[in-house]
């Protein structure tokens, strides 16, 4: 979820340490221009605007308890939405597996009345916000730049939907503060601080999600992680966090257990159809669901039949499973599970 990472180390060094003196808006804009990025001139997110100071009554109590709380919050939408919720974060360049997990678990939490908190970035963050919106829940997007400097710019509609649904778009920076690199790391402490627990659905190595996990632990919050295949580089970071002691979320039941322990949510009974879906007889489908695979890894599971070659049979069966919604083709060409 580290949007600023793409701006490169050279620009990051120009900004200086996030632990040093606060960067002025004028200097931030100069750095933003020097990096070759144009000033945002698109539509602004509409809705009630609030400036909430640390000493104000409506300042989030969850943030007061953190070691480095923001002194001021710029909020578009409902300040009451800045309640203790569940942070759902993950990779920007997410696989269908990561996107599916963000949707699946974000939706389950939102259906239990839990506010979904994330960073508004591409990939898993955006999917987490949409998971809450899809079931009429509330969600909060914590931005790296100011709320009027919509980033990424294609998420204007998403941010507007968040505000219209009773949620909030928030930043610790002034309205038109540009999204400079260090600000994304800094905003991660706000995401972790607002959340009672942080769920990481997919993370490779290196990953900006690690800073959010560190902030969550520093604030004595729970860190939950969805494991991935040990063969997948997209899950290497997630699996490392599990190795370091994070709570594994391995299925719907373990997630419901976590919601009960952390938020007091009652567990939902699993339907018979959910249980039966675990029973898979086809070794080809089982292989794809267990670990995303390239075609050449799967062809040995298919033998020649009559006039059809193994390659033709494989293509036919993969297409059938795609139509049935079991699998999909990943950006790198592998076939893997669809997580709903």
Image (cartoon, rainbow, N blue to C red):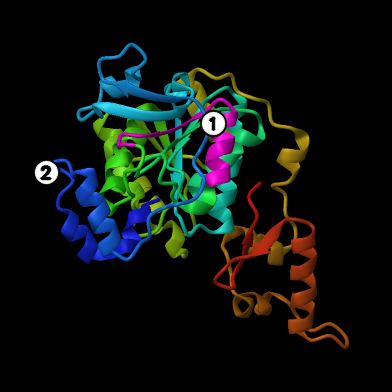
**Which residue is rendered at x = 59% and y = 66% of the image?**
330
Marks 1 and 2, the one that precedes in the sequence: 2
Foreground residue, 35 or 57? 35
Foreground residue, 138 or 146? 146
Alpha-carbon neighbours of circle 1 within 10 Å: few (<14), some, or many (≥20)?
A: many
Q: In the rendered view, tell whether residue 85 sits above or below residue 56.
A: below
Counting the numbered discs, the total is: 2
Q: Which residue is mark 2?
A: 20
Q: Left of 24 or right of it: where is 206? A: right
The image shows residue 125 at horizontal and vertical percentages of 48, 45
**Which residue is rendered at x = 42% and y = 24% of the image?**
82
Q: Left of 297 or right of it: where is 187? A: left
**Residue furthest right in the image:** 306
Q: Which mark is residue 16?
A: none
Distance from Cα at disc 1 to Cα at disc 2: 33 Å
Q: Which residue is mark 1?
A: 163
């Amino acid at each position: 979820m580290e949007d600023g990472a793409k701006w490169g180390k050279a620009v990051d060094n120009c900004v200086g340490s996030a632990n040093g003196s606060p960067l002025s808006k004028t200097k931030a804009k100069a750095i933003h221009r020097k990096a070759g990025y144009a000033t945002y001139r698109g539509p602004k997110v509409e809705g009630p605007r609030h400036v909430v100071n640390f000493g104000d009554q409506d300042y989030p109590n969850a943030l007061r308890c953190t070691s480095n709380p923001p002194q001021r919050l710029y909020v578009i939408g409902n300040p009451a939405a800045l309640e203790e919720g569940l942070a759902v974060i993950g990779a920007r360049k997410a696989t269908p597996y990561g996107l599916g997990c963000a949707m699946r678990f974000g939706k389950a939490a939102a259906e239990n009345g839990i506010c979904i908190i994330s960073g508004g970035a591409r990939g898993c963050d955006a999917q987490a916000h949409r998971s809450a919106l899809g079931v009429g829940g509330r969600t909060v997007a914590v931005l790296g730049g100011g709320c009027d400097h919509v980033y990424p710019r294609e998420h204007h509609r998403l941010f507007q939907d968040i505000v219209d649904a009773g949620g909030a778009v928030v930043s610790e920076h002034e309205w038109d503060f540009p999204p400079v690199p260090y600000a994304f790391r800094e905003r991660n402490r706000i995401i972790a601080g607002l959340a009672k627990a942080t769920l990481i659905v997919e993370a490779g190595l290196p990953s900006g999600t690690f800073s959010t996990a560190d902030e969550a632990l520093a604030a004595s919050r729970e860190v939950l992680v969805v494991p991935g295949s040990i063969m997948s580089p997209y899950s290497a970071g997630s699996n490392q966090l599990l190795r370091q002691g994070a709570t594994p979320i391995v299925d719907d039941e373990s997630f419901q257990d976590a919601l009960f322990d952390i938020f007091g949510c009652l567990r939902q009974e699993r339907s018979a159809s959910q249980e039966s879906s675990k029973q898979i007889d086809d070794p080809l489908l089982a292989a794809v669901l267990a670990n995303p695979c390239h075609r050449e890894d799967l062809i040995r599971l298919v033998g020649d039949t009559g006039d059809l070659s193994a390659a033709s049979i494989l293509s036919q069966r993969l297409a059938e499973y795609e139509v049935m919604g079991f699998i999909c083709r990943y950006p790198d060409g592998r076939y893997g599970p669809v997580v709903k």
